[in-house]
Image (tube, rainbow, N blue to C red):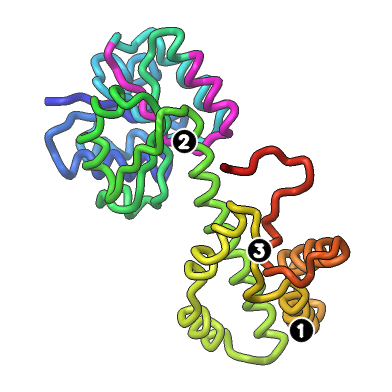
């Protein structure tokens, strides 16, 4: 029976352990800096280790579900003496891209099998194998754990061999989620100022399709070409109406967006589509060909 280790048993890590054990066919050893969180998983059949090195001994896969880069680095250092030669380290932690690339290079040079595999899912999805898992790293290494990782998620996306790609894409996904929820919170402030029930705003949000706007305008940003469909200066007028309606309510994202629009209009691009918000700035050499 395959044996895996899960290091980091907070909300997401614990949910992964519960899911692995509920599906059967795997034994799981866990470790967490706060022992009580690991001990709680013995009720599901997990074994608790005293140290990271003890946790990974005999494991074919090690899943890291930690807080940040520093925690990943210290945990990897602490577990190295217990790793087997063929153990694959699957790091689900949301990390900084440059540090992820450096970590992957250093571990590869040391002969360790590291993959970065952040997820777009919460604890309920981790328990029931829903959501999406991204993975970056060598194709051969991904193939070794493909079936096991696929069983943990609704969609497994191998984004490529470049070690930091999954890290970048995870930040892209989280930026969208945080931005949408942040704007939704400001919309609630706006309708409060207009003395409109929040339930009406929720219904309007449900009838609006932001994914369509992204699909339509993201290619403009990719190509740095902004044929006008909704002019920036007209969008700025609408934003002025929003801010006037919100009055003194806390809507910092909308106010920051207004400032960015004003700077672009002053630069002479007010007649272009408002997707010009995402233009490549002068001297930026990153335009795709």
**Horizontal placement of 261 versus 128: left or right?**
right
Instruction: Residue 269: say if magenta.
Output: no
Which numbered tag is attached to residue 226? 3
Identify the mark nearer the N-term, 1 or 2.
Answer: 2
Q: Position of residue 288 (x, y in %)?
A: 58, 43
Q: Marks 2 and 3: which is nearer the front? A: 3
* Between 198 and 168, the one nearer to me in the picture: 168
Q: In percent of the image, x 72 and y 76: which residue is there?
A: 235
| Residue 190 visible in the current orientation | yes
Please provide the residue range marked out in magenta. 86-106
Quadrant the N terminus occupies:
top left
Mark 2 lies on residue: 93
Q: Secondary structure at mark 1?
A: helix
Mark 1 lies on residue: 241
Q: Position of residue 270 (x, y in %)?
A: 79, 70
Quadrant the C terminus occupies:
top right
- Circle 1: is it few (<14), some (14-19), or many (20+) Cα within 10 Å? few
């Amino acid at each position: 029976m395959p044996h895996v280790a899960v290091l980091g048993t907070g909300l997401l890590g614990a949910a992964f352990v519960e899911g692995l054990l509920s599906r059967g066919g795997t034994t799981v050893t866990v470790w967490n800096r706060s022992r009580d969180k690991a001990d709680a998983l013995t009720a599901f059949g997990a074994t608790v280790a005293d140290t990271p090195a003890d946790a990974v001994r005999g494991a074919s896969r090690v899943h890291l579900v930690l807080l940040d880069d520093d925690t990943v680095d210290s945990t990897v250092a602490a577990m190295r003496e217990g790793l087997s030669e063929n153990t694959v380290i699957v790091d689900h932690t949301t990390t900084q891209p440059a540090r992820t690339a450096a970590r992957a290079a250093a571990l590869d040079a040391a002969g360790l099998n590291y993959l970065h595999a952040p997820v777009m899912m919460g604890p309920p999805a981790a328990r029931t194998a829903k959501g999406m898992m991204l993975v970056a790293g060598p194709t051969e290494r991904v193939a070794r754990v493909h079936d096991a990782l696929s069983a943990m998620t609704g969609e497994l996306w191998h984004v490529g061999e470049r070690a930091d790609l999954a890290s970048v894409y995870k930040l892209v996904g989280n930026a969208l989620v945080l931005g949408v929820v942040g704007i939704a919170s400001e919309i609630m402030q706006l309708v409060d100022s207009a003395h409109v029930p929040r339930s009406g705003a929720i219904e309007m949000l449900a009838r609006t399709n932001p994914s369509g706007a992204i699909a339509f305008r993201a290619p403009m940003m990719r190509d740095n070409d902004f044929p006008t469909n909704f002019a920036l200066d007209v969008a700025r007028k609408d934003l002025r109406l929003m801010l006037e309606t919100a009055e003194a309510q806390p809507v910092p994202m909308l106010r920051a967006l207004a400032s960015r629009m004003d700077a672009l209009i002053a630069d002479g691009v007010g007649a272009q589509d408002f997707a010009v918000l995402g233009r490549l700035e002068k001297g930026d050499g990153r335009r795709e060909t």
